[in-house]
Image (cartoon, rainbow, N blue to C red):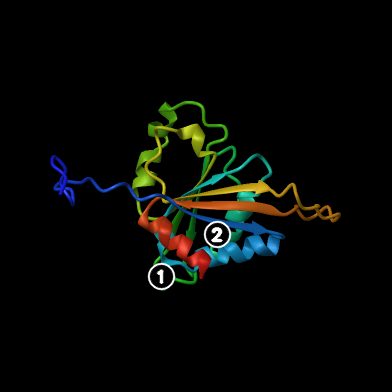
Amino acid sequence: MEIGRHVPPIVETPAPAAPSLWRGRWASEADTQAFAARLAACPAIHNATLTLQGDLGAGKTTFVRHLLRALGVRGRIKSPTYAVVEPHSAVDGPLSPTGAPLAIWHFDFYRFTDPREWEDAGFRELFASPGLKLVEWPERATGLMPAIDAEIHIEPDDMMPTSTDDDTDGPRILRVTAHTPIGRQLLAALQA
């Protein structure tokens, strides 16, 4: 034994868990829909906070629409670009107990400029309540948002040719980074 050194250490602070990462690709909108369905089938989605990262037109809102449909949301699904938040409720999703609605909030902070709006609009209460929170442009609310469970980063796959069909977007590359146990459960659902 070396003098002045404890083996094993007497007191040790555990290192924080490194975030988990999953990489994937959507070649078509059908792939986006399948990805959304896998997340919707994971019970952890019911109380997750997910951020969606990517440039304008990356496919964030398209993904949200597929996820909400997979969770059982009916009716029109609007983008919250101007309203900042759109509430949704899913009653008959794949994991919803009969009659127990799942509260879902879709935030789009693209036009968010005044931090006072956070309190005035009741965002603190929404994020503290049970349910799924989907957040586009989270960097515009830096310092205000609570911890997130997972970050989904979507970007065009510039290495692959795009379709000549005007109704379909080109392929997308995604990265999903889990930051919490809930996020890691969602990653496990993607890998299943």
Choose between 167 and 87: the one closer to the eye.
167
Q: Residues within 10 Å of mark 1 (few under 14, many from 20)?
A: few
Q: Is residue 54 above or below residue 98?
A: above
Which residue is at the far right? 164
Residue 181 rendering spot, x and y as whole percentages:
36, 57
Q: Is residue 179 above or below residue 142?
A: below
User: Could you tell which of marks 2 and 1 lies nearer the N-terminus?
Assistant: 2
Secondary structure under the numbered disc 2 in the rendered image? helix
Give the residue at mark 2.
68
Residue 128 rendering spot, x and y as whole percentages:
34, 46
Q: How many marks?
A: 2
- Quarter holding residue 20: bottom left
Q: Residues within 10 Å of mark 2 (few under 14, many from 20)?
A: many
Name the residue at 51% across, 27% down: 113
Name the residue at 71% across, 59% down: 27
Residue 21 rendering spot, x and y as whole percentages:
49, 54
Name the residue at 61% across, 60% down: 66
Residue 77 visible in the displayed image? no
- Quarter holding residue 44: bottom left
**Horizontal relation, residue 145 to residue 55: left or right:** left
Q: Is residue 119 above or below residue 72?
A: above
Secondary structure under the numbered disc 1 in the rendered image? loop
Give the residue at mark 1.
99
Residue 170 rendering spot, x and y as whole percentages:
75, 53
**Horizontal relation, residue 116 to residue 86: left or right:** left
- Quarter holding residue 137: top right
Q: Amino acid at mark 2?
A: Leu
Q: Amino acid at mark 1?
A: Gly
